[in-house]
Image: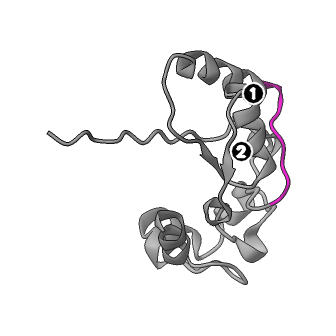
Amino acid sequence: MVPVATLLLLRHGRTTANADGGLAGRQPVELDETGRAQAAAVGERLRSVPLAAVVTSPLIRCRQTLELALPDADPLVEEGLIECGYGAWEGQPLKKLAKEPLWPVVQQHPSAVVFPQGEAMAAMAARAVA
């Protein structure tokens, strides 16, 4: 029997943008106090898991999460794992964006979305999978 690899996906901890209801996108948003506590807590859960490799997005919130969760890891920074390019939507409050005509498409058919002055969700998905 061929061994099967297990892939663990870890989302970054809460950020100031998450707490404020904003769409951070690629902005250099950092973890807030809750996010730092979340990262430390997941580190406790992962402490006994043997990891063959650790890969991260270049975003500061992702690197901070890893530094707190897995301080001894030597992660590979993978540019292709960066957040979707939300273009004109980046940094906007989600309450405001929810009133945009494109919002229902984002919610119901995200693969069909191309953000204004930004990236297509399908292109982001293909980039991340690659």
Earlier residue among tags 1 and 2: 2
Q: Residues within 10 Å of mark 1 (few under 14, many from 20)?
A: some
Q: Give the quarter of the figure containing the N terminus.
A: top left
Amino acid marked by disc 1: Leu
Any magenta on residue 29? yes
Q: What residue is disc 2 on? A: 62
**Residue at x 79% of width, y 62% of height:** 92
Judge whether 18 appears above or below 118 on screen: above
Q: In the image, is 55 to the left or to the right of 66?
A: left
Question: Which is nearer the eye, 103 or 38?
Answer: 38
Q: Quadrant of residue 89?
A: bottom right
Q: What residue is disc 1 on? A: 68
Any magenta on residue 100? no
**Residue at x 49% of width, y 26% of height:** 50
Question: In the rendered structure, which segment of residues is drawn in magenta?
Answer: 27-34
List x then y, in percent, for residue 107. 49, 62
Q: Which color scheme is applied? A: one colour
Q: Secondary structure at mark 1?
A: helix
Q: In the image, is 17 to the left or to the right of 94?
A: right
Amino acid marked by disc 2: Cys
Q: CA distance from mark 1 to mark 2?
A: 10 Å
Question: Which is nearer the eye, 109 or 63?
Answer: 63
Q: Quadrant of residue 61?
A: top right
List x then y, in percent, for residue 128. 53, 64
